[in-house]
Amino acid sequence: MARKTDIRHYQGFLPMTVLCMVLLYGPLIIVMVYSFNDSLSITRWGGFSLRWYYDVFFGLEAPKFQKAAFNSFSIATMAAITSTTIAVAAAVGMIRGGQFRAKTASFALISLPLMVPEIVTAVATLIFFTTIGFTAGYATILVAHIVFCIPFAYLPIAARLEGIENIYEEAAMDLYASRAQAFFQVLMPLMLPGIISGFLLAFVISLDDFIITNFVKGAGIETLPTAIFGAVKQGIKPNIMAISTLLLLLSFVFVTLSWFAGRMGSKNP
Amino acid sequence: MAGPGNSRGFQGVFTPLRYWLLLPSWLVVGFFMVAPVLIMLVYSFLTKEFRGGVIWEFTLAAYDQFFLDRGLFGDEPPKIEWTYIGIFWRSVWQAGLATVLCLLIGFPTAYYIATRPPATRNIWVFLVTIPYWVNLLIRTVSMKFLIRDNGPINEWLLSAGLIAEPIHLINTPVAVQLGLFYSYLPFMVLPIYAAIERFDFSLCEAAADLYAGRWFALWHIIIPNVRPGIVAGCILVFIPSLGAFLAPDLLGGAKNFMIGSLIEEQFKGTAGNWPFGAAASMILLSVVLVVLFFNARNRATQTSGAGH
């Protein structure tokens, strides 16, 4: 009854929402289900099995995937640490810097990697590295990921810092703390949920990136997404569905952690 | 910031360090993002080398190739070259359609979520946020798996007797559209949700008291008020769709090229044409910058016009 008189209620919006969720999750769930399919033909259901997961870890292509996974994880870790550090400094400068002339320009610069289409960033980065003679490979992927991850790390950190009043660092300074102490012992612990959230997002963005990596990687080095792309070009095989499921679950875990970290104690910082 | 009674005057604790704190981000983004785009601009005016790469000689050949057709031997009077403009137009069209479809599904979803009680609202937002961050490649691959000729959907429809032949979607424009729409749907929901969540529903109650119908209120009160969120969502869907590479490549095949695939092709292997790829990237970037510029100007005039 209350629902009928609720001015905010619109008939048909709930079915649309359900449709939206089915569209968003349907394909992912179906791939996950079929990755447990004990059948060589990937669409006929042949019973539950973990054989494709076994294949990913111990099968013929396992060394290739392990190498790609090592590259992906080591690059994501280093890129996330570096970009988060840069983003923390930038957030303190922006949010605690008062009004200054370069503020708008600085924000535009930090968020630039979000505005420019990814393929343009990829082309520009490839051309740049070629021009300065920086040979393609592991290091070029790492540098490109650091740049691309900065805005993703910056946004949750800045949002967190905006919610923290400056009385804490002021109090620390009044009690004769140095600036470094005021930052590392007072402000940073308060910012920590934002920093963790930003770090995890940067990690996921780096881990999942395909387009930029594909351009700058050069021959002979693969990350998980480029290895998956290469394999999919020859047709979707069950072991690819298994490895995709693992990567999906990993992203899911990291995004969930980031989500909760971002909300941790946000009521009274 | 800090009050006047403070020992450091009007300055906050970290205010004097602001430029030093921002310096790393300026340097990294400036050196590895702004400089590369400028070098790409230079490349678009260079002469191509046949094994992929460039010769440092100034020429307009790349842009000429994009827009003009001078015949097979380059000696005919120039006509407009429709191939690449056609690819560009197809990209704009597909991206525009994806934006409209995302809006049609995304707005009711965002509205429904924003009008839930806070506890359930967070669960919904979380559900929309997850695909936003999940690997785009895997999402596109899963869509490809789903709609293949012998994929699960066709198998089910066939075994249920609903269709006699598999529905052929892969390598059609419809598949590309489906991929784009599916990829960027969360980008539409989240900003609209944020705008509706801030909307003051007492305005609707006032409208209802004055005998406005629900749909009248939606069209004349809610939508105008949450327009910035709708515009933001449309931009967030349109821009990545325009430069999309994965959806056209994996779902569309060679016949459904979009600008992203055209660019990618110029840098793959030895058959590519780097200046042409750089020129196509610059043209794409210009379109994006024009969209962002008009949005920024629009927003500026709106806020000054509204008087706050």
Image: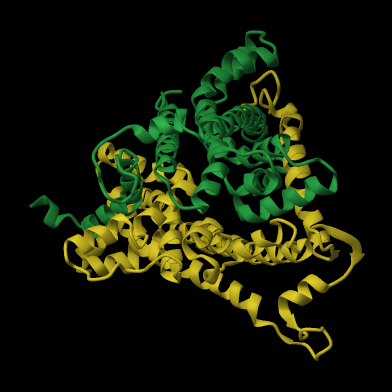
Chain colours: A green, B yellow
Residue at point 43% right, 50% down? A236
Q: Is residue B217 above or below residue A89?
A: below
The x, y position of residue A262, in whole percent, is 45, 30
Quadrant assignment, res A189: top right
Q: Residue at x 41, y 69 (%)?
A: B174
Is residue A58 left or right of A219 when viewed as pictured? Answer: left
Name the one closer to the observer, B273 or B122: B273
- Whether residue A214 sits left or right of residue B55 in the image: it is left
Let me know if residue A101 appears in the view: no
Q: Could you say which quadrant of the image residue B46 lies in?
A: bottom right
Q: Disc count in the image?
A: 0
Q: Residue furthest right?
A: B57
Residue shown at 52% from the left, 20% from the top? A190
Quarter holding the N terminus of chain B is top right
- Position in image of residue B235 (x %, y %): 52, 60
Is residue B89 left or right of B20 when viewed as pictured?
A: left
Between residues B276 and B297, which one lies in front from this camera angle? B276
Name the residue: 59% across, 12% down: A185
Q: Residue furthest left?
A: A1
Horizontal and vertical percent position of residue B181: 42, 60
* Residue B9 visible in the snapshot: yes
Q: Choose between A8 and A121: the one closer to the eye.
A: A121
Q: Position of residue B39 (x, y in %)?
A: 81, 54
Q: Is B157 rendered above or below residue B119?
A: below
Q: Given the current orientation, which residue lies at the most extreme bottom position?
A: B77
In the image, taking residue A221 as reference, residue B303 lies left or right, namely: left
